[in-house]
Image (cartoon, rainbow, N blue to C red):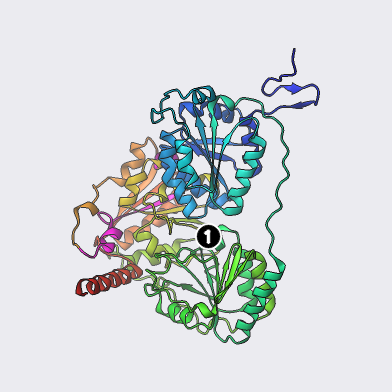
Amino acid sequence: MGTMTAPGSSNTQTGTAQKTLGQYLFDCLKLEGITDIFGVAGDYNFTLLDTLERYNGVRFKSGRNELNSGYAADGYARIKGLSALITTFGVGELSACNAIAGANSEHVPLIHIVGAPPEKDQKEHKLMHHTLMNGDFDVFHKVYKLITAYTAVLTPENAEIEIPTAIRIAKEKKKPVYLVVADDLVTKPIIARKEPVPPRPTSNLNTLQAATEQVRHLLERAHRPVILVDVKTMRFGLETAVRRLADAMNVPVATMMFGKGAFDETHPNYMGMYGGSFGSSEVQTTVENADCIIAVGMLWADVNTANFTAKLNPLVTVDIQPDMVKVAEAEYPNVLAADMLLAVQKVGYKGQGLVEKAIFPYDQITGGTDEPLSAAIYYPRFQQMLKEGDIVIAETGTFYNGMAQVRLPRNVTYIAQGGWESIGYATPSAYGASIAAPDRRVLLFTGDGSLQLTAQEISSMLYYECKPIIFVLNNDGYTIEKYLNVKTEDQQYNKVPRWSYTKLAEAFGGDAFAVTVRTYGELDQAIIQADKERARRLCIIEMIAADPMDAPENMRRMRNYLEMQEKQRSQN
């Protein structure tokens, strides 16, 4: 007998059991705290899934399609810090493309694992199913190179190098990565390879000191500084550092729209959302008249800056990014955000806090019991119902704009796809969030149009006994799209079929508390009832909007701005 060792058997010379590629892969994911992997079965990933079924401590969570499973993995990663997705070759991975590109756009670390045709068939360029029938097995891998931070073709020889590398890059860059493995290699024993782990990035201390000196000069002359918190604060785990800075400096703090949830909105210095000309004019005045702006993790994107109506004076802005800092016009590369935030704190600036107590748009509950549902009525009710520790998922569209203005309690995880804005994201994401945090209350706010793209995942929620409270805003179509198109009226393409949303659970073979509400009184009762019911079952509250074109204030301001722009265009 030779020295070949069978999968999982002991090698008598070294006394260690050789792990198979599949076992090693799941070991690595388990070490990162991943307890559930999303995906859809397909014949090229059977060996991966068979290995996973026999594996302890990580479970497979099957989705209704790959796109939705990708969104679910995205929601899971936003809570747990990392997630994994398994699809089959070609048909499965292309179906998940949109979700992976979204994770890239939104800085969400996710490991996408693809089961591919057997190695021998690939080498012989056989015409296999799920391919383009041209013998090319690398084409989908090439697609993924463009939308992920790292890709690798796994083999027993390179597994011990490639898998840890991919995971490290996903965590450092907060981006998705892609691993493809031939179906027949999953059960092969891996060849032990120990590579030195590259050191974690550190700040260049001279550059850090130079940047800090420049910030010190700015703050010495400043009388009205503000801190502006944005999305990368959340993605790169900088919330605590930012909070400490805000406590130490005692200056007003605002968040950007993408950055909602990155700063404690009950903090005495929190003044609200900075939404350029579409948001609160008090916040706009304070931010734009500041003589030093410390911006953390900012993303200067159209929606985030209210169509670029946000105006920050670059000469007084300290732009702190995960791995570099820009102070006024000077760039300081290789400075880590955590170090910079601490350095700014040590400058020792002491402010006066908020000049006057902040007023939030939804602090006052208005409307009588029989009043039909409108944004002015239901957003204050949502604000009142939220509790510490909730997970709030807001779908792109009307709810994304409205929920942005709701003041969140402490320790709420707020999930929305501000930049990628793929409608339909929120429902599967809420499923992923429910799997990630089974003990927390999950609240999904989605529109009728969006829900129709990915409603199948309510089936997965029921199947895996997830119990979110789902609010469906039935405003008869894509209201956000109607607002964005100022050129025409009453577009046919922005209408959607009328579904019986409260019957979805039944159709999906499950049990839910489901109710349709039309007035403030009915909504109020439904919320009270849902909070009692949610311990044992999923809840669906369908809200019929009295006026399909009703929308929160910031959306109306956006509409007015777009109409004004359109007028100017047509006059030129």
Please provide percent x and percent y for residue 374: 30, 64
Instruction: Report the residue at 36% width, 37% height from top.
Output: 508
Displayed quadrant of residue 511: top left
Q: Is residue 343 above or below residue 41?
A: below
Please provide percent x and percent y for residue 266: 54, 70
- Left or right: 309 in relation to 111: left
Judge whether residue 33 can be spotted in this image. Answer: no
**Residue 138 or residue 84, whichever sits in front:** 138
Q: Assign the N terminus to one quadrant of the image.
A: top right
Please provide percent x and percent y for residue 493: 22, 52
As helix, strand or loop, the secondary structure at mark 1 comes to loop
Q: Assign the C terminus to one quadrant of the image.
A: bottom left
Question: Dot 1: within a 10 Å radius of its alpha carbon, few (fewer than 14), some, or many (20 or more) residues?
Answer: many
What residue is disc 1 on? 412
- Left or right: 162 in relation to 102: right
Question: Three-letter amino acid code at disc 1?
Answer: Val
Displayed quadrant of residue 204: bottom right
Judge whether residue 537 can be spotted in this image. Answer: yes
**390 in magenta:** no
**Residue 460 or residue 319, whichever sits in front:** 319
Instruction: Report the residue at 44% width, 46% height from top.
Output: 99
Please provide percent x and percent y for residue 157: 65, 31
Q: Is residue 172 above or below residue 314?
A: above
Instruction: Report the residue at 59% width, 84% height from top.
Output: 352
Q: Magenta residues?
A: 458-487
